[in-house]
Image (tube, helix red, strand yellow):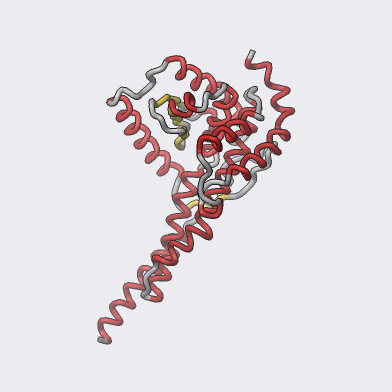
Amino acid sequence: MTGFTLVQLGKRLVAATLALLALASCQTVKTTQPGVVGVDREQNMLVSQRQVDGMALDQYRTTLNEANKKGQLNRNPEQVQRVREIMQRMIPHTAVFRADASRWSWEANVITSDQLNAWCMPGGKIAVFTGLIERLQLTDDELAAVMGHEISHALREHARERISKEVGANLLISILGAATGTDTRTASQGYQLLVGLPNSREMETEADRIGIELMARAGYDPRAAVSIWQKMQRAGNGGPPQFLSTHPSYATRINDLTQYAQRVMPLYQQNKEIRK
């Protein structure tokens, strides 16, 4: 019995030591400049941008290949043109937040799907789903609001940050399990409720605010960021309570965007002529 206990203790100490060494390699970075909207939070990263960009590119290629095989890729030339023109107008203004972004290998594609969805992977790979455009009957300004939000996730490296948070949380929970020999499922669930979900909501708010500045600088009416979420609210039939969601509630989001639309209106007024 004593020998077994010592072996188990040794394993726990090794696991705890490795976890602490990994956490010690965590870097505090500032991925973007604050802009007019003032997003200025430093982020803790446990994985490199290069690692995440590589994984994202592999997933992006896989997604496009699957869509292409199903005949779902870029079927409507008019929609593709709209999406790519909005992207091209926004790209120069990404430099306000990070100087390297305008040199990314940007791409935009449209996938035929009934989903109300769009995303921008790390490195500037964008996909917009036809369900979002068609079911919500998006104007160019509203489409720019969606794309600005998704581009902002990439600028802020939120995917890298989420992965880092998960890695860090799992390591800390492993330390707890190694030290106590207990089941860590409850601790993992508690982390998601108390830390993981609020952090995800913080990232969504940051993307909303940076996105609304990007669209204003590109000459798109920032008030469309409010109207798109009003449309999403009508289409979404409510949703879970905010404290159980990875996204802010519709009311919280709409109120915040209304305030920030007013903050960036001077930028829109200065730049709206570039679209003509």
Residue 5 in picture, x, y percent from top left: 29, 82
Q: Which residue is more in the foreground, 122 or 141?
A: 141
Q: Quadrant of the C terminus?
A: top right
Evaluate whether residue 146 shows in this view.
Answer: yes
Q: Residue, x 53% and y 43% (percent of image)? A: 238
Q: Residue, x 44% and y 28% (percent of image)? A: 131
Q: Residue furthest bottom?
A: 2
Q: Which residue is more in the foreground, 137 or 118?
A: 137
User: With 3 as the anchor, is 87 left or right in this view?
Assistant: right
Q: Residue, x 51% and y 45% (percent of image)? A: 239
Q: Total marks drawn?
A: 0
Residue 83 in picture, x, y percent from top left: 49, 22
Q: Residue furthest top?
A: 276
Q: Quadrant of the N terminus?
A: bottom left
Evaluate whether residue 20 shows in this view.
Answer: no
Q: Which residue is more in the foreground, 35 or 273?
A: 273
Residue 178 in picture, x, y percent from top left: 38, 72
Quarter of image, res 217: top right
Whether 126 is drawn above or below 12: the answer is above
Residue 189 in picture, x, y percent from top left: 44, 62
